[in-house]
Image: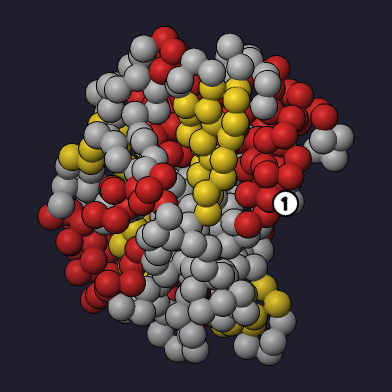
Amino acid sequence: MKITDAKVFVGGPGKNYVTLKIYTDAGVYGLGDATLNNRETLPAKYLEDYLIPVLVGRDPRNSEDIWQFFYRGAYFRRGPIAMAAFGAIDTALWDIKAKLAGMPLYQLFGGKSRSGAMVYAHATGADLDTLVESIAAHVEQGYKAVRVQCGIPGMPVSSYGVADKREDSKHYITDFGGIQPKIEIWDTERYLRYMPDALTAVREHFGPDLKLLHDVHHRLLPREAAQFAKTVEPIGLYWLEDPTPAEDQSALRYLRQHSTVPVAIGEVFNSVWDCKQLIEEELIDFIRVAVTYAGGITQVKRIVDLAGLHHVRTGFHGAPSHSPISMAAQAHLNVWAPNFGIQEYLVLGTPECDALFPSDHTLENGMFLVSDEPGLGVDFDEKQAQRYQYAAGSHPVVRLQDGTLWNY
Ligand code: GCO
Ligand code: MG
């Protein structure tokens, strides 16, 4: 059996999805997602110029060897661009394998450990009242868990995860005005003074059962993060995400020694090596990698297994940037993983998105229910894809009030 061709498509409704389709001489094809948010053309080019020409002619069933061939073969290892490209190939090969087996992908991992995966959505408000409204709307729809982000009084420009308007809440991460980034202003002192009270007010309003998550988006220094974690401990957060920039992983020991707040990290990681210290030293409670950025199913499954040895549960990244293809791959991992925790999931389900990526995965009462179709259970309509093209976008860049660059 041979791979006969592979094509990359960039574009989508309100997103630059990078979709890989691998064709075989057995008539079966596989799909992968290489959507590296706001740098989408780079994994696409890596695939087209360096990987696809070498992929054609290989046996698609040898997904492990193909993964190793590209990873080791690049010599300059890791990095989000390469790992997104390898990951798309890997996901497509698992899709092919499961289609050949005539089974939904989760069966190849070991079957179902649960009926569905609990997800969390993003609630956001420019102020506390709007945030409470946004959370209430999610609770109404059946969500058991929400991430809560709120504007901070006196902060000159809105902060991470805060949509200016309620309708913007699904698309606030990328600004499609071009590649020139908008500037956000950050003020740690205001954040530390305001956010614990805001989170307390949310907890009091919604009671003890709703799972509340909060994302610091790498903005605090280790000591500040420890102080914040200690202060919010009585609120009973489900997790505190990215309290510090995680390049300095030892810094997490500080937080750990001062607080029992569950910590979730890893959305910017792209290999098992990035996760190793945090997992082995048990400095985190949830690992946040994504199939899209972390080398596909082969690599992420290895991370899940390592995490399981250290009581670390999964909480895969699922910002709206990922396409329904990698969200499907994660859904199969979620339903299998013995150490599953929660899945971030923002409903992409516009009619346009559903037409481009038809599938019968469903969301019911805050639970993601995986499709039983052979493979990933998601398709890609090439005709629909012709309606879309790449649109330049950017993440904001963050400065302190005196102009100093900070972490987005
Ligand atoms: C999250 C993330 C995202 C990232 C985005 C960057 O927890 O969902 O922090 O919102 O900012 O994926 O492209
Ligand atoms: Mg995050």
Nearer to the camera, 303 or 235: 303
The residue wearing badge 1 is 247
Tell me what residue is drawn at x 74 percent, y 51 percent.
Answer: 248
Tell me what residue is drawn at x 66 percent, y 63 percent.
Answer: 221
Q: Is residue 75 above or below residue 398?
A: above
Q: Secondary structure at mark 1?
A: loop
* Residue 235 seen: no
Look at the image and tell me in which quarter the N terminus lies: top right
Establish whether ligand 2 lies closer than 8 Å to the Cβ of label 1: no
Look at the image and tell me in which quarter the C terminus lies: bottom right
Tell me what residue is drawn at x 68 percent, y 44 percent.
Answer: 48
Nearer to the camera, 8 or 42: 8
Q: Count every numbered label the image shows and give the total.
A: 1
Residue 394 spot, x, y in % from top left: 57, 70
The kind of residue on which mark 1 rests is Glu
Tell me what residue is drawn at x 68 percent, y 89 percent.
Answer: 402
Nearer to the camera, 83 or 144: 83
Residue 388 spot, x, y in % from top left: 43, 60
Residue 398 spot, x, y in % from top left: 61, 76
Residue 376 spot, x, y in % from top left: 40, 28
